């Protein structure tokens, strides 16, 4: 079958236009993918709210309401964290201004820190113990470089804020037109790749939802439980620490770093029993969550072994950043599904070949037949 020149021209033109569109949107592809992830994972909630309210022609209002709720869930912790960081930065600035006049003596608990307490106290005294040492330390920090980093940070905050707006905007349109877009995408995949392609697409959606449940939701639960431990042991800002732990818990084994730092702070301040108790409690929570609950949520839904889930998460993080947390396991799930289909196809062909051989042998033996 030959392709007509007009058809070739249309294919080439369509490919060039798609490439141009991808190049124009490449800066926002990550934000659009975040909107898709949020839409896929919260779609059952959107459908249930629609069914509960009984709205038919006004489902856009439900999309607006749910988008605003998700935006608030994302923004409120971020605003709280930024506010706390600004407060701490102001306190640090006042402390440094006072230290330039009278120095900053080492805290008493620093000397009692295990193993390196004396060395840390001596380092503190030589760096911040006198006004001259404080001025020299601040000079080494290069104020001009700090200002440049502050400008870069402000630029990144502005970019991320606009990216959040793009994510929520795409989420609204995915809610409003999700059913139509889903039918169109599955129809296009079916025409291009057949029923097998449709099954792979559905498998990818299941993988995204399972990854969100296994990473985000479980990470938030870990942060909540460890936040209770932070509050009980008397750590300052337990809510902030719980939020940081929940974010780090989305990355396998990263929550242990936050837990270890918090436990060491308690031990260094003289609360050895509280620090050890917090560490044991946190380790038990993390081990149960990451070794039992998370593999069941992710691998059980998409039939992906935990090793490949872990490699997909780490590989996705290394190559795609935070969005790789969801993209990595999804790609691994589809690849493993293709691999299993190929093995099943080979087994079917071997069984058919064996049956054909047995049938030929049966037909050739004294007119008898052998049925298998």
Image: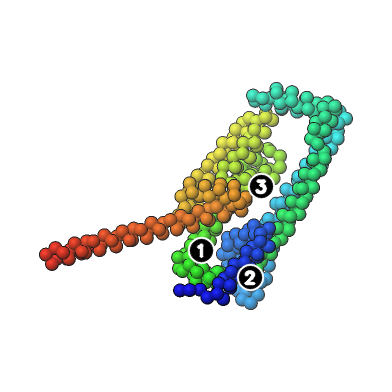
Considering the numbered disc 2 on the image, is that residue within a helix, a strand or a loop?
helix
> x%, y% of residue 240?
69, 45
Q: Crowding near pointer 1: few (<14 within 10 Å), some, many (20+)?
A: some
CA distance for labels 2 and 1: 21 Å
- Compared across the picture, whether 139 is left or right of 328 comes to right
Q: Earlier in the sequence, mark 2 or mark 1?
A: 2
* Residue at 84% over, 37% down: 94
| Residue located beneath label 2 in the image | 176
Question: Which numbered disc, 2 or 1, marks the residue closer to the eye?
Answer: 1
Q: What is the CA distance from the residue labelled 2 to the residue labelled 3?
A: 31 Å
**Visible residue check, residue 103:** no
Which quarter of the picture shows residue 233?
Answer: top right
Of residue 343 and residue 61, the one placed in the foreground of this image is 343
Q: Which of the pair 177/219 is nearer the observer?
A: 177
Residue at image mark 1: 201
x and y, in percent, of residue 283 in the image: 56, 39
Q: Determine the residue positioned at 86% across, 33% down.
A: 98
Q: Nearer the viewer, mark 3 or mark 1?
A: 1
């Amino acid at each position: 079958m030959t392709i007509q020149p007009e058809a070739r021209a249309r294919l080439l033109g369509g490919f060039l236009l798609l490439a141009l569109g991808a190049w124009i949107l490449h800066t926002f592809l990550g934000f659009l993918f975040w909107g898709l992830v949020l839409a896929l994972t919260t779609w059952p909630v959107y459908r249930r709210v629609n069914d509960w309210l009984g709205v038919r022609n006004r489902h856009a209002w439900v999309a607006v309401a749910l988008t605003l709720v998700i935006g608030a869930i994302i923004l409120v912790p971020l605003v709280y964290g930024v506010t706390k960081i600004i407060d701490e930065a102001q306190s640090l600035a006042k402390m440094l201004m006072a230290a330039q006049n009278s120095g900053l003596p080492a805290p008493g608990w620093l000397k009692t820190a295990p193993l390196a307490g004396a060395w840390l106290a001596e380092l503190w005294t030589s760096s911040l113990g006198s006004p001259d040492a404080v001025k020299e330390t601040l000079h080494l920090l290069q104020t001009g470089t700090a200002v440049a980093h502050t400008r870069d940070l402000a630029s990144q905050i502005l970019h991320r804020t606009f990216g959040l707006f793009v994510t929520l905007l795409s989420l609204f349109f995915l809610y409003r037109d999700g059913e139509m877009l889903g039918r169109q995408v599955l129809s296009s995949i079916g025409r291009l790749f057949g029923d097998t392609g449709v099954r792979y697409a559905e498998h990818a959606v299941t993988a995204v939802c399972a990854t969100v449940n296994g990473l985000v939701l479980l990470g938030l639960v870990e942060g909540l439980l460890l936040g209770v431990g932070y509050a009980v042991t008397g750590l300052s800002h337990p809510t902030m620490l719980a939020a940081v732990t929940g974010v780090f818990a989305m990355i396998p084994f990263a929550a242990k770093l936050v837990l270890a730092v918090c436990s060491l702070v308690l031990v260094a301040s003289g609360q050895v029993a509280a620090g050890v108790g917090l560490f044991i409690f946190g380790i038990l929570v993390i081990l149960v969550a990451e070794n039992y609950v998370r593999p069941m949520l992710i691998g059980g839904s998409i039939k992906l072994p935990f090793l490949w889930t872990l490699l997909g998460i780490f590989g996705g993080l290394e190559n795609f950043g935070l969005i790789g947390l969801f993209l990595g396991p999804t790609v691994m799930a589809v690849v493993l599904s293709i691999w299993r289909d190929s093995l099943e196809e080979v087994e079917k062909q071997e069984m058919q070949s064996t049956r054909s051989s047995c049938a030929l042998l049966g037909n050739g033996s004294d007119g008898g037949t052998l049925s298998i």
